[in-house]
Image: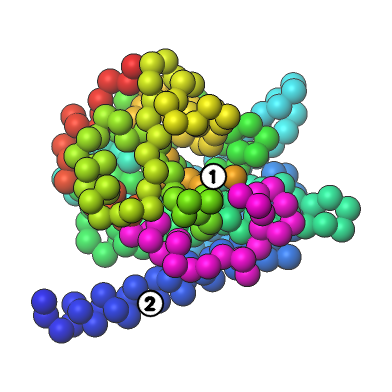
Amino acid sequence: MPAIILLCLMLCAGSAQAQWLVDIQTLSSAAMQGRQTGTAGAELARQFIQERYVNLSLAGFTPNYQHRFNYGFGQNKVAINMVGYRQGCTYPEHFIVVTAHYDHLGTQGRKVFYGADDNASGVATMLELAARLSVVCPAYSYLFVATDAEEDGLYGSKAFVAAPPVPLNRIVLNLNLDMLSHPDQRGKLYLTGARHFPELIAELEADFSNIRFLHHRGPPGKLRDIRRLDWPNASDHGPFHQAGIAYLFFGGQEHAYYHTTADTWQRIKPEFPQKAMQAIWQTVQWLEHQPPTVLQRIVE
Ligand SMILES: [Zn+2]
């Protein structure tokens, strides 16, 4: 390996980790007040995401990357997805949509729900993927979607699937990222939706001992491993799945800080999210080497 590449592997990985943490710290800072949909804190989060998209040279479909939608009773609530775009070189007409929700629970009185793990960690990881995919032209075109109103009921991803900026049948896969910085009690990260990609499972099983695979059995909503949580609808991959689009969902299990004011960046231990990032990046590289027909499989 040439020395320059080795140097980059060491330094670039270091700076990527630093940027990842800065992104989490910023999104989960007191200034953003828990990023509840429709608040000034959410607006600050959007300004930050916009800055990062600009830095990453992502194209947009709208001014400031904003996609506004209404939801709720009488459609009286307003929320805004942030959509950045990177065109691919081998399959430019086929899209992989990376999603991570940026909204969280906001405040209760003087208490702030910072949402560092849920889901500043997913947004930061999505930005890191965008950075890595900007170095060389990727095979697929990518949409990076920081969704809003996930906590209220996956409304950002529902709005995206209802009115996508590219034809829905050109979306080959949704890669959804939600809560990546804490392991479950057994030290595991969860990957759902990989049942149709056995080679990917084999590769990840060989290289990572800390991934737990959850597989659909039968109709949507039924899973073999977990009965308590409805994993297909646990996060933003749900509406993609409902629309018949393949998905991969990397996410954490509920932990002691989940939906509490203790979900802060100070509680994140870097080793676990570093491993998670490696597994997610290896997954993206695997996807990059598959033709669209492999990814765009029939969802039963
Ligand atoms: Zn979440």
**Tag of residue 253:** 1
Query: Looking at the image, which residue is at 38% across and 77% down?
Result: 14
- Image coordinates for residue 174, horizontal then vertical, percent: 38, 37
Horizontal arrangement in the rendering, residue 209 relative to residue 294 (left or right):
right
- How far separated are the C-alphas under marks 2 and 1? 27 Å
In front: 280, or 239? 280
Of 59 and 33, nearer the camera is: 33
Task: State the extent of the magenta-drawn residues as a range.
Answer: 255-278
The amino acid at mark 2 is Gly
Q: Residues within 10 Å of mark 1 (few under 14, many from 20)?
A: some
* SS class, disc 1: loop
Which residue is label 2 attached to? 14
> Would residue 223 be counted in the magenta stretch?
no
Is any atom of residue 36 visible in this view? Answer: no
Residue at 72% across, 33% down: 77
Image location (x, y in percent) of residue 158: 54, 29
Q: In which quarter of the image is the C terminus?
A: top left
